[in-house]
DNA sequence: AATAGTAATGCAAATGTTTTCATAAGATTG
DNA sequence: CAATCTTATGAAAACATTTGCATTACTATT
C-alpha cells in the first residue's frame, strides 16, 4: 500500500500531501523566489516524505531543455579520448547538464545512427570528434539546428564551432624536431586515415615538412597500425628488423609511440641512442615512462573543458555564433629523441 | 516559413503530410506489422520529407521506457574504467539503449547527487562501481526499485546484482605469487581505501595471506598513492630510496605498478633483478611494456559486457531476481617478477 | 477609507506521444 | 447473400509537467 503510493509519487501527489496546487510545487522547483518560504518548506517536506523525483522527460516535453548533451566519440577506451571525455563531462556537469555518450568505432555510418539516436533523446547540444562526418550527419545537424561543437581539430574556415588543435601543424612540429636533430632517415607509423581526419592532417603536415627539406620517406618505412600499443609494437618490430632501418620513428600519436619505444627496447635497441621516437599528443603517462617520451603536446584536458563550457554557454544563452578555438601546440622534448648515430 | 515547418515537425505534422492519423504514424513506428505496407510507405516518405525525428521524451512520459541506462563511475579517465565503460556501452547499445554517464571522482556524496540526476532522467537501469555507497544512495535505489547492477566487485551475499571479481582473492593471488618466489620483504603501494572498497579488499587479501606466512609489512613499506603513473612513480622512488628496501613491490593496480616499474628503471634498478613488481588488473598495455608486467588478470571487457547484457535483459524481461557473476582471476606471470636477489 | 499595487496561489491549456476502444471496409464462410 | 471474422485506421484519453492568466488577500498610497 505504502509501496504503491511511493512508487508513483508524482507532482500531484506531492501537491496533495503539501495541500497546495501542482502549479505551486512546480514553481517551488523552478522559480523558488516566487513561492512563500513557508509553503516551500511544506513542499520540501512532502517531497522528502514521498521520495519524489522530478521527471525530466515531462519537462522536456513541455518545451524545456532536456538537460542532456550528446557526445559521440570514435572510442571511449583510449587514453586519447578518455581524458577529453572526462574534462568535457566535468564542464557540462558543472553547468547542470548530463552526458549522453556513444561511440562508433571509427565507423561514420554508425556515427550517423548515433547522432540520430541522440536527437531522439532531444539532447540540447552535440559534440563530435573532428570534422569528418557523412553528409547525412551534417544535414541532420543543420536541419535540427542544435548547438554543435567539433572537438579535437581546429579549422579556420569551419562552419561548425570547434575547439582543438591544428593537426597539420602538429605533424609539422614533429617533423621539424626530428629534422633539427639531423635525422633524414625517418620511419612513419600512423593509423589508417580513413574516417580519421586527425591522422590524415598530421601525416600530410609531416610529409610536407619533410619534402621541404628534400627528405622522402620510402614506402617500406611507412607503416600502418591501429591505436593499440600491442599492434604498434609489432609493426615497429617488423620495421626495425629491416636491413636498412630508419634512425627515427615519427608516430601518429603517443600510444603508437609507446609501442615504438617498447619495440625498440624489446629488440635491444637503445632509445634514443639507436633510434629516436617522437609521438603526438602527450597523453597521461607519456611523461613518466622511461625514458620520457618526446612528443607534441595537445592539451586534451583544456580542449575538453573549453568545449564543454562553450557548448553549455551556447545552449543557455542561445547564442548561435560559430566559435573557434585553436589551442597552442608545443614540442615537449624528453628522453626519446637525440641526434642520429652516424654509424648506421 | 519552411523553417518553421521543419523545426517543429511532430507526429501530427507527419500525419497530416501523409494524410493519415497520428495513431497510424505511431503504429507504423512501433508495430509496423499492424499497418498496411502502402500506408507505411506514405508515412516513411513524409517522415523523410519533413526530417521528423521521434521524441523519446514524449514516449518516456507515456510510460514507455526511456531507452537510457545510467552508469556512475569514479572516473572516466582511466584505463581501468574506460575499458569497462566501452564494453558496457557496446553491450547496451546492441540492445538499443543509450548510455548516460557521470563520474564523481571517488566522492560518494557526489555519487548520490549523480544517482538522483539519472533518476530524474528516468533511466531504465543503473550501473555502479563496487558496493560502497552511501545509505542514501542505497535507499533511493531500493525505493525506486529500478534494475541495478554493481560492476567490478563480486560478493556472494550481495543483495544487489553484481558482476566482478573477488578482490580479496585478487590480493591473495598477488601475495601468493610473491611468496612462492621467495619474497618476504614486500612493499605495498596502494591507493587510499576510503570510498574504494576494491582497494580495501585487495589490501586485506594481501595482508591476510602474508600474515599466514608470517610475513609482516612494516609501516614505512606501506605507501599510498592515487591511481596515477606519475604520482605512483614518485612514491615508489621514495620507497626504493630507503636504506633498507623491499625486494618486491605489490601494487594496488597496474597503473601503480607501471609507475613502480618506471621508478625502478629511473633509479637504475633492474626489474626484476633488483626488485620485483606485481600489479592487479592486467590493463591494456601491461602486456606490452618492457618488461611485461606480471599481474592478476581481471577481465574488464568481459565484466563490462556481461554487466551490460545482464542489465538490459533484466530491464526488458522485467526479471527482478538478483544476478551474481564472479569472474575468474588469473595470475599472469610476465617479466617483472623473479626470485629475490639474496645479496640485499 | 477607498484605490492602486503587489505577492502568492490556483485553474486550465498545452506539450508529443502511445494505446484502448470503436468503427469501417473487405474477406470468408455457411 | 447474410453473417461473421479480419484488417486497417481513427478518435480520444492518458502520461507528468510548466506557464499564462485569473483570483484572492494583503500592504501602501492618497
Image: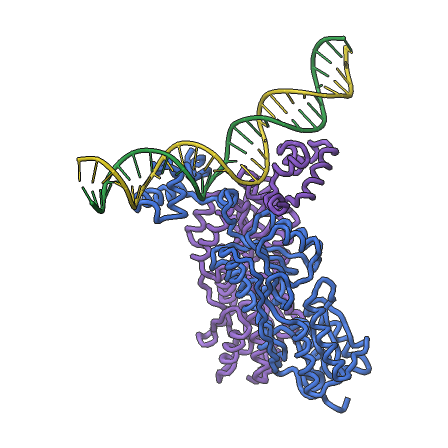
Chain colours: A purple, B blue, C green, D yellow
Looking at the image, can residue A269 be seen? yes
Residue shown at the point (62%, 63%) measured from the top left: A297
Q: Position of residue C1 (x, y in %)?
A: 76, 8
In the picture, the quarter occupied by the C terminus of chain B is bottom right
Left or right: B242 in relation to B68: right
Residue at position x 62%, y 73% in the image? B281
Residue A166 pos. (x, y %): 55, 58
Residue C23, position as x, y percentages in the image = 33, 33
Quarter where residue B202 is shown: bottom right
**Front in this rendered view, residue B234 or B69:** B69
Vertical comparison of A59 with D24: above or below: below
Residue furthest toward the bottom? B343
- The image quadrant that residue A298 belongs to is bottom right
State the residue in front, A111 or A131.
A111
- Work out whether residue B18 or residue A183 is closer to the camera in this orientation and state it: B18
Q: Residue at x 58, y 43 (%)?
A: A315
Amino acid at each position: 500500500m505504502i509501496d504503491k503510493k511511493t512508487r508513483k509519487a508524482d507532482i500531484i501527489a506531492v501537491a496533495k500531501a503539501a495541500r497546495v496546487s501542482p502549479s505551486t510545487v512546480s514553481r517551488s522547483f523552478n522559480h523558488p523566489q516566487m513561492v512563500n518560504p513557508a509553503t516551500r518548506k511544506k513542499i520540501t517536506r512532502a517531497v522528502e516524505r514521498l521520495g519524489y523525483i522530478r521527471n525530466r522527460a515531462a519537462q522536456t516535453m513541455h518545451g524545456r531543455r532536456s538537460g542532456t548533451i550528446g557526445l559521440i566519440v570514435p572510442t571511449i577506451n583510449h587514453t586519447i579520448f578518455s581524458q577529453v571525455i572526462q574534462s568535457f563531462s566535468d564542464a557540462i556537469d558543472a553547468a547542470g547538464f548530463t552526458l549522453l555518450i556513444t561511440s562508433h568505432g571509427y565507423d561514420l555510418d554508425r556515427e550517423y545512427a548515433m547522432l540520430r539516436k541522440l536527437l531522439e533523446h532531444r539532447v540540447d547540444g552535440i559534440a563530435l570528434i573532428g570534422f569528418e562526418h557523412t553528409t547525412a550527419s551534417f544535414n541532420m545537424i543543420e536541419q535540427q539546428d542544435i548547438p554543435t561543437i567539433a572537438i579535437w581539430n581546429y579549422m579556420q574556415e569551419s562552419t561548425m564551432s570547434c575547439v582543438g588543435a591544428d593537426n597539420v601543424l602538429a605533424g609539422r612540429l614533429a617533423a621539424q624536431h626530428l629534422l633539427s636533430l639531423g635525422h633524414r632517415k625517418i620511419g612513419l607509423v600512423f593509423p589508417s586515415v580513413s574516417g580519421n581526419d586527425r591522422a590524415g592532417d598530421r601525416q600530410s603536415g609531416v610529409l610536407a615538412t619533410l619534402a621541404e627539406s628534400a627528405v622522402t620517406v620510402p614506402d617500406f618505412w611507412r607503416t600502418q597500425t591501429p591505436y593499440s600499443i600491442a599492434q604498434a609494437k609489432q609493426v615497429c618490430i617488423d620495421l626495425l628488423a629491416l636491413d636498412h632501418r630508419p634512425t627515427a620513428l615519427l608516430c601518429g600519436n603517443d600510444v603508437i609511440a609507446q609501442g615504438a619505444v617498447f619495440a625498440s627496447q624489446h629488440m635491444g635497441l637503445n632509445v634514443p641512442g639507436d633510434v629516436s621516437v617522437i609521438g603526438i599528443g602527450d597523453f597521461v603517462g607519456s611523461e613518466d615512462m622511461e625514458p620520457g617520451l618526446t612528443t607534441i603536446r595537445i592539451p586534451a584536458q583544456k580542449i575538453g573543458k573549453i568545449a564543454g563550457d562553450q557548448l553549455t554557454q551556447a545552449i543557455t544563452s542561445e547564442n548561435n555564433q560559430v566559435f573557434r578555438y585553436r589551442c597552442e601546440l608545443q614540442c615537449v622534448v624528453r628522453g626519446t629523441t637525440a641526434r642520429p648515430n652516424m654509424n648506421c
